[in-house]
Image (spheres, rainbow, N blue to C red):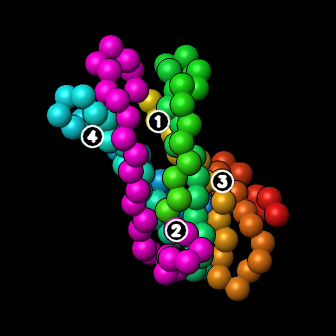
Amino acid sequence: MKRLIVLSLLAAGIAAAQPTPIFEIDVRLRVVNDDMLYVVVQVDNRSGRRVTELAGYITESTPEERIVSEQRIVHVHPYDPVLTDGQTAIRGYTYPFEKSMDHRFRYHISRVTFRNDDRVFAWSPSDGLIRVE
C-alpha cells in the first residue's frame, strides 16, 4: 500500500514538472470553393505576460520537407491592444488549391515582445524563448 502511494505521488510530481509551452499554435486548413485553400493560424498566449507584438512565418512544404513558400503573418501589431494571458490571436492566409499537391504548413514565431520589456524574442516549442535583439 505504501508503495502504491509513493508511486502515485512520484507520477504526479513528474507530470507536474513537465514544462508547459507559453504559446499554443494550431494550424488549420480550409478548402473554399474547391480552388482556394485558407490556412488559419491560431496562437494562444499562455505566458502569463502581456504580448505587445507577435509575428511569425507560415511555411508551406512538400512531403520531402522542401520549402515551397513562406509568408509573414503578424498577429499583434505594436499599435494593437496587447494580447493578455489566456487570449487568442487568429490570422489566416489564402493559397491556390491544387488537388494533386500534398499541402503541409508549419508556423514559426519569429518576433515576440512583452509589455514593459524592450527585448525582442523568437520562440520555438523545443527551445523556448530566444533573445534576438
* Residue 1 visible in the picture: no
Q: Which residue is mark 3?
A: 110
Q: Amino acid at mark 3?
A: Ser
Bounds of the magenta segment: 76-103
What's the mark number on residue 54?
Answer: none
Q: Would you say 89 lies left or right of 78 here?
A: left
Quadrant of the image occupied by residue 28: top left
Label located before the other in sequence (4 or 3): 4
Label located before the other in sequence (2 or 1): 2
Would residue 108 be counted in the magenta stretch?
Answer: no
Gap between marks 2 and 3, in whole Å? 12 Å
Gap between marks 1 and 3, in whole Å? 16 Å
Q: Residues within 10 Å of mark 3 (few under 14, many from 20)?
A: some
- In this rendering, the answer to whether 52 lies above or below 40 is below
Q: Residue furthest left?
A: 33
Q: Residue furthest bottom?
A: 116
Which dot, 2 or 1, sits closer to the camera? 2
Mark 4 secondary-structure assignment: strand
Q: Which of these two is toward me, 34 or 10?
A: 34
Main secondary structure found in the magenta portion = loop
Q: Which residue is mark 4?
A: 30
Q: Which residue is mark 1?
A: 105
Gap between marks 2 and 4, in whole Å? 23 Å
